[in-house]
Image: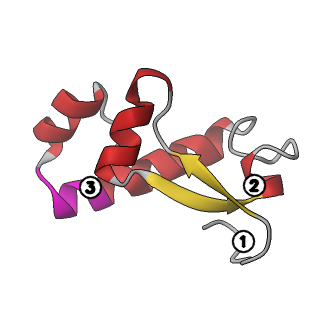
Amino acid sequence: MVCGTTQGLHRHHIFFGANRRLSDKQGCWCWLCGPHHNLSSKGVHFNRELDLQLKRRCQKAWEETYGDRNDFIRMFGKNYL
């Protein structure tokens, strides 16, 4: 998703914690290489800007597919756009 590699991919849930199951159910996850996931300081778990970038991309795609912004906020509890 970030660097384009197809090797050693990790499944990353865009929304975690209480929303992790929703991420699975709603398709809010992506493939990331290890370093962009959690194996380096540039990984999404340590890089707030990358985390927000993925959340914004996901919300935009979700709204285009499933509903409007208010629906997204009701489901995930926050607006990232």
Circle 2/circle 1 CB separation < 8 Å: yes
Q: Main secondary structure of the magenta part?
A: helix
Q: Quadrant of the N terminus?
A: bottom right
- Residue hosting label 3: 62
**Which residue is at a point 40% across and 46% down the rendered structure image?**
24
Chain-order first, disc 2 or disc 1:
1
Q: CA distance from mark 3 to mark 2?
A: 22 Å
In the rendered view, tell whether residue 55 sits above or below residue 16.
below
- Residue hosting label 2: 36
Q: Amino acid at mark 2?
A: His
Q: Amino acid at mark 1?
A: Cys
Q: Which residues are magenta?
A: 61-67
- Is 33 within the magenta? no
**Which residue is at a point 78% across and 74% down the rendered structure image?**
7
Chain-order first, disc 3 or disc 2:
2
**Which residue is at a point 59% across and 42% down the rendered structure image?**
51
Q: Quadrant of the C terminus?
A: top left
Q: Amino acid at mark 3?
A: Trp
- Residue hosting label 1: 3
